[in-house]
Amino acid sequence: MTVFSAFSNEEIIAFLKSKVIDGQVFTDPATLKKQSFSSKMTSDESGLALAYIEAKSTKDIQGVLQAARKFHISVIPQDQYTSTVVGADGLAGSFVLSTKQMNQIKEISKADSLAVVEPGVINGDLDKAARKQGMFYAPDPGSKPISGIGGNVATNAGGMSTVKYGATKDNVLGLKVVLADGREIKVGGRTLKQAFGYNLTQLFVGSEGTLGIVTEVTVKLMPIPIGKPTMGIAFFENMTKLAEAVAEIRISGVYPSMLEALDNATIEALDRYEGTHYSENSGAMLIFKVDNNVPEVVNKLKELMDKHGAVNATVTTDSTEQAGLEKLRRDMLPAVFAGQNHIMEDMAMPLSKLAPMMDYIHEVGEQKHLKIYVAGHAGDGNVHPTIVWPKEETEAPQAVVEALQLMFHKTLELGGTISGEHAVGTLKNQWNNEELGEDVDQIQHQIKALFDPMGLLNPKRKIN
């Protein structure tokens, strides 16, 4: 069918460039391909964006949205572009709007225990800046060295410290957001308590850029705990035994700040990647951390692990050794992904159901004859099974698809969620009705229509 457009692409780009004053507009094929497909999960040339914009100010964002409204063009928000669920890939003829150049730490207030940052600030950079003033930023996703605060807000990122300090939503006090109609609004504020009005702050956290573009974030900072932290590792017969130990630790009063689980297949991958020999110990590894070296706490932790068959447990207060353990956990993904196609999933369970889910994932792997690597943030019930297949097979084999469906259904049956911290994006939006129910699914679309009546902001993501 022939489409008669009122404007040429050249006219659209010229108008767009007139509205982006501080930032840059890119239209060269190499940049468009990189920013449209760098998730590596989509590469269809027909999905190429029309323009990629690196905004440097709120006015730039407002200008892009003005052009989008005028020409009815979709806007795909990006920050550091680390989505694992195809939540920020370009769409055909869209504007890809990046906030990664809006990367200033505007304020760190020790007195008020907060920081005010632009969305492009890297999570780890904020934490380092806060620590220079005796504070720290608690959310600690595996992507901490590369992911931006704006993306963390968009996806409600979790991480290794969530077990004690909560996910991103628990650490955001306020936001500035540009709506689809161009208005910049301020929600939340600088206070630790706030009960006035509807809680719009938390509505935007986790909305994946479908309701507005975040331009400023006010986050909580925590004082660095007194004393030396203690970290350690322990080995269990299997992930089920490990999960049982974790469930008891979580209700013991110990309050660990890290409880990370890795199964034997993952440990073997790390041994190959790091040149270590951890897989010789047992079937599953628990990496744990408490913020203070209090003997009663450390002894209780050891006692509970011993009760569930832990062996070769070691602890350390040495900062270099602790950094090595943290690196081990962060290197898990490149170790598992090396040379293979992969899908890493992100289910979260009630803690009492974590052990049964570990058993079930093992059963699915055997049933479908698949290699499934299992790791995750055991302390908050968040499990990341990763399925791999040969690099030469570009499409996921049918057995992989079936295995994911089985695991998703089992997760929901156990009262869990199929997206604990990686968001929904394109890969999971067809499950909204299944997980949330028809009524809530409809309400989500009504909210989307209220904030974005033209449907311009990140369409086909989050709620489909």
Image (spheres, helix red, strand yellow):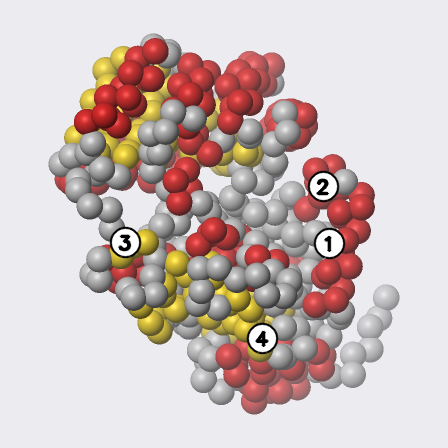
Dot 2: element: helix
Q: CA distance from mark 1 to mark 4?
A: 21 Å
Residue 102 image point, x, y percent: 42, 72
Q: Which mark is residue 185?
A: 4
- Residue tagged by mark 2? 436
Decide: marks 2, 1 in contact (CB < 8 A)? Answer: yes
Left or right of 13? Residue 165 is left
Q: Quadrant of residue 235?
A: top left
Decide: marks 3, 1 in contact (CB < 8 A)? Answer: no
Q: Residues within 10 Å of mark 4 (few under 14, many from 20)?
A: few
Amino acid residing under circle 1: Gln
Dot 1: element: helix
Is residue 248 at least partly visible in the picture? yes
Decide: marks 2, 4 in contact (CB < 8 A)? Answer: no
Q: Which mark is residue 223?
A: 3
Q: Which mark's residue is nearer the viewer, 3 or 4? A: 3
The residue that appears at 66% across and 73% down in the rendered structure is: 180
Amino acid residing under circle 2: Leu
Residue 255 image point, x, y percent: 35, 34
Q: CA distance from mark 3 to mark 4?
A: 30 Å
Label whose residue precedes the other's in the sequence (3 or 1): 3
Q: Residues within 10 Å of mark 2 (few under 14, many from 20)?
A: some
Q: Which mark is residue 444?
A: 1
The residue that appears at 45% across and 64% down in the rendered structure is: 191
